[in-house]
Structures are given as C-alpha cells and as structure tokens.
Amino acid sequence: MPATTPDPATPLWRAAQVFRLLSCFYAFGFQVAVNDDLERPALGWLLFGVLLAWSVACAVAYLKGFGRRLAWVLAEIVVVVALMLSTDIVASEQWALDNQSWPTTLWATNATISVAILLGPIYGMLGGVVIVAASTLAKGMLSYDLGRNATVVIELAVGLGVGMAAQTARRAHEDLQRAARLAARTEERERLSRQVHDGAIQVLALVSRRGREIGGETAELAELAGEQERALRRLVSSAEAEPADGQLVDLGARLRQRASDRVSVSVPAEPVLLDATVAEELAAAAGNALDNVAAHAGPDARAYVLLEDLGEEVTVSIRDDGVGIPDGRLEAAAAEGRMGIAKSIVGRMNWLGGSAKLTTGPECGTEWELTVPRR
C-alpha cells in the first residue's frame, strides 16, 4: 500500500504480528516436545529456522507496510503450505496421524489472518480452506471428527472474523473521509458566501436602493442591479453538493431557487428535510406549476409559494393571481393528447404516494396544493 495512503487496517496488522510472535513461541515449544519423535530431527530444526526467518520477514513487511499487498500474502501462503507438507519428510506417517501437522496449525493460521486483513472475509475463509487442505494432505486423510480435529472450524472462523473486522475498518474510514470532505466543502461554500455577501451583493443592493431614490434614467439601472442581486442571492443559497439517493436535503432550499421578481417563496425558518429523491421530485412538480404560471397566467401575474411542514406530511402550495383556467380546459387538453399537468404534476405526486389538488376558475387564479407523506 502506498506510504501516502493511510491504511485503516493498520491496528489489525499490528495485532496480527503479536499473534505471530505468540504462535512462534508455541511452535518452538512444540518443536522441543516432539523433536525426539521425528524421523529427521536435524532437518526439523533446520526447517524451524526457516520458519523463524520467514516470521521475522513477514512481521517487518506488514508492520512497515511494504508487505501489505497481494504478492506478499500469496508468498506467505506458499511458504506455510510448503512447511506443512514437509511433515511427510521430517516425521513418519503414523506420527502425522497421531499429531497435528508440523510446524503446528496455530502458526499456519498467520497466513489466514494476513489474507483476511488484506482481502476481506470471503478470501480470508478461502485462505483458511487452503490451510485445512494442506493439513489434510500432510496427514494423508480427511477427518470429519470436529471434536478431535477442529482445524477447519478455527480456520474458517478466523478468516471470517478478521476479514469482517478489516472490512468494517475500511468502510468506517471511507465514511469518515467522506464526512471530512463534505465538511470541508461546506466550510468553503460558507466562506465564499460570506465574501460574496459582504462584497458584490451589498454593492448591488446599494446601487439598487440609491438608483430608485435618484429616479429618472438611473431607475432602470437600479432595477437591473436589483435583479442581479436577487439572482446572486439565489445562486449563493443553492451552491451545495449534489446529494445522493438516501440522503436528506432541505426542500426549502430547493424552492428558494425559484424566487424572482414575480415569484415569492415562503419557507419555515428551520430546514424541511426530506429524502433527496422525494425533495427533487416535489420541487420539480412545484417548478412545473410555476412554469405554467409564467406561460399561461398572464404577463402581470405573480406567484406565491408556501412550504408547510406538518410533521407527518409536507405541503407545498403554489398560488397565482392570474387569469385562471377556464372550465373544461384541462379535459380538452387531455383529449388533445397534451398531458403536461397529468404527468408532470399529478403523476409525480402519485408516484411519491402523495396528492395534488388543483383549485382554479376563470379570473380566479390558480392554486396547487402538493402534499407528500413524510417517510
């Protein structure tokens, strides 16, 4: 793993090397105890020296970090399997049947642990299966008596448990990094918003106010400055990262983006948090209603958007003071195949499990009441 990338599984690697040290002590004691029973005791001690040298190399590699890669872990599997299969060389067939494989399955478990930390629980269990297979070959028979031979259970449990711990550590680290990046972006947006507010927005507000006071030809410039001030405020309020599905977003912030000279938006002081998908669909339905106001309510019509958080449900009301919709107009549009309202507004609300209520009439304006349940 690159030195510049912190490994969230580092504590597990360190703990694994403590286990490696203890297993070496156990293997040494086992070697002393059975040495006289081996057919080739001198060769046994020579191979035990190989075991110690490889254990030291692995400990250094994993603690320093340069060994935390696939090639090194595969090499460890090969060395461990080779040492286990050497049982047939240093001991008799009967000894192998009566004892655990040389140089003990406890020490061989280090390879399972290394695979599990690096690759996760599935490959950790597969590593354990390889160790069990090597032990079976060393003995020359497969034992189904788990009471006397629990190697398979131990290896699978170690591979699963250590692998899941490593996987959880890496996921937690990713979540923490994601949260840190989000916090940094939020802080940067707030800093930029303060700079824009203290600079350009205040200047535009001053030009707009002074232009109206002076009147005459500067009134037109004042009106343009006012429009740009409001547009800049909307841009600043909407400058946020794109949410992922399942995240909660503020519906009020979405609706404030539609505020303009002809659209007044009123939202609660506290954020109205909804699932990102629900918020986007509800804001899109409200936006379609506002587009209809701009297109059909008349050149002087104004629209008013009201967001209400009712606890169990959220309601968005879009009202205008335009010419309204004549009786039968919606039915006629549907008969002509124009399904804009039915699909873009009513269809969206039905898909969300909510409702869309329309109140209108000739010269009475139009009011949509969009309601969704809070899940």
Image (tube, rainbow, N blue to C red):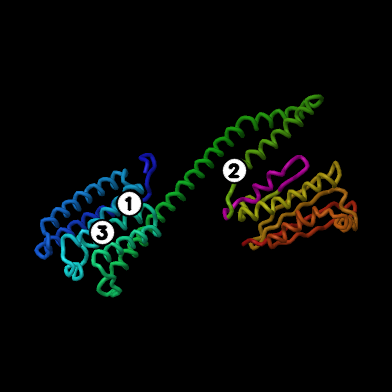
Circle nearer the N terminus (2, 3): 3
The answer to whether residue 174 is left or right of residue 375 is left
Secondary structure of the residue carrying numbered label 2 = loop
Magenta residues span 246-265
Q: Amino acid at mark 3?
A: Ala
Circle nearer the N terminus (1, 3): 1
Relative image position of residue 171 (x, y in whole percent): 44, 53
For discs 1 and 2, the disc positioned in front in the rendered view: 1
Q: Which mark is residue 108?
A: 3
Relative image position of residue 359 (x, y in whole percent): 82, 58
Q: Residue at x 61, y 33 (%)?
A: 196
Circle nearer the N terminus (1, 2): 1
Q: Amino acid at mark 2?
A: Glu
Q: Which residue is mark 2?
A: 240
Residue found farthest to the left: 36
Q: CA distance from mark 1 to mark 2?
A: 45 Å
Relative image position of residue 354 (x, y in whole percent): 70, 61
Vertical placement of 175 versus 151: above or below? above
Q: CA distance from mark 1 to mark 3?
A: 13 Å
